């Protein structure tokens, strides 16, 4: 396979993996928001006047105060960035590695990084 073609394929896999990780990130954030909005359940132990979302780091939250009709909001950009990076590492990176290894010739793929005959027991 030519080097230019390989670079284009890796770029393509990176873009597809990034789109997949964005979809997973939005889905997880939406499910986390739905979990916080479930205040009518008799089993809900969360405060009805406050919700936070972001998994694993909370990056956005709102809190309603009794004396004010507007919510007090807080946003943490660093936590959002860490959540995005973690999601990308868990979703896109394995996808890229899998697709690149799948395109490799079998003889290259089956070789170990360390030749087993050189290992002394």
Image (cartoon, rainbow, N blue to C red):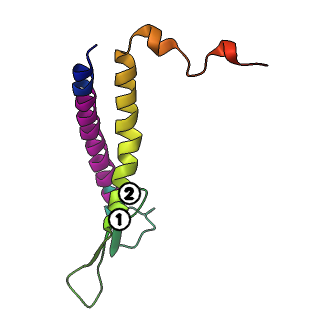
Q: Residue furthest right?
A: 121
- The quarter of the picture where the N terminus appears is top left
Principal secondary structure, stretch drawn in magenta: helix
Q: Height in image: 102 above or below 41?
A: above
Q: Which labelled disc corresponds to residue 100?
A: none
Percent coordinates x, y for residue 68 in the rendering: 23, 88
Q: Height in image: 109 above or below 8?
A: above
| Residue at the (39%, 25%) spot, across then down | 98
Counting the numbered discs, the total is 2
C-alpha distance separating marks 1 and 2: 6 Å
Residue 95 magenta = no
**To which quarter of the image does residue 29 belong?**
bottom left
User: What segment is highlighted magenta in the picture?
Assistant: 10-33
| Residue at the (56%, 18%) spot, across then down | 112
Tell me the residue that label 2 is attached to: 82
| Residue at the (30%, 85%) spot, across then down | 65
* Residue 42 vs residue 12, the one in the foreground: 12
Secondary structure, mark 1, is helix
**Classed neighbour count for the residue bearing mark 1: other residues with Cα under 10 Å, few (<14), some (14–19), many (≥20):** few
Q: Height in image: 118 above or below 38?
A: above
| Residue at the (53%, 14%) spot, across then down | 111
- The quarter of the picture where the C terminus appears is top right
Secondary structure, mark 2, is helix
Tell me the residue that label 1 is attached to: 78
Asked if the residue at tag 2 contacts the one at tag 1, i.e. Cβ–Cβ closer than 8 Å, the answer is: yes
Q: Residue furthest bottom?
A: 67
Q: Height in image: 79 above or below 5?
A: below
* Residue 4 vs residue 24, the one in the foreground: 4
Percent coordinates x, y for residue 26 in the rendering: 27, 49
Residue 23 magenta = yes
């Amino acid at each position: 396979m030519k080097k230019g073609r390989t670079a284009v394929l890796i770029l393509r896999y990176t873009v597809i993996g990034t789109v997949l990780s964005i979809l997973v990130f939005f889905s997880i954030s939406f499910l986390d928001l739905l979990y916080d909005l479930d205040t009518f359940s008799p089993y809900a132990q969360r405060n009805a006047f406050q919700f936070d979302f972001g998994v694993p780091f909370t990056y956005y939250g709102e809190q309603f105060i009794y004396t004010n009709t507007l919510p007090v909001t807080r946003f943490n950009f660093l936590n959002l960035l860490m959540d995005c990076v973690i999601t990308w590492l868990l979703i896109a990176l394995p996808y890229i590695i899998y697709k690149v290894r799948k395109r490799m010739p079998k003889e290259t793929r089956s070789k170990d990084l360390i030749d087993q005959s050189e290992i002394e027991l």
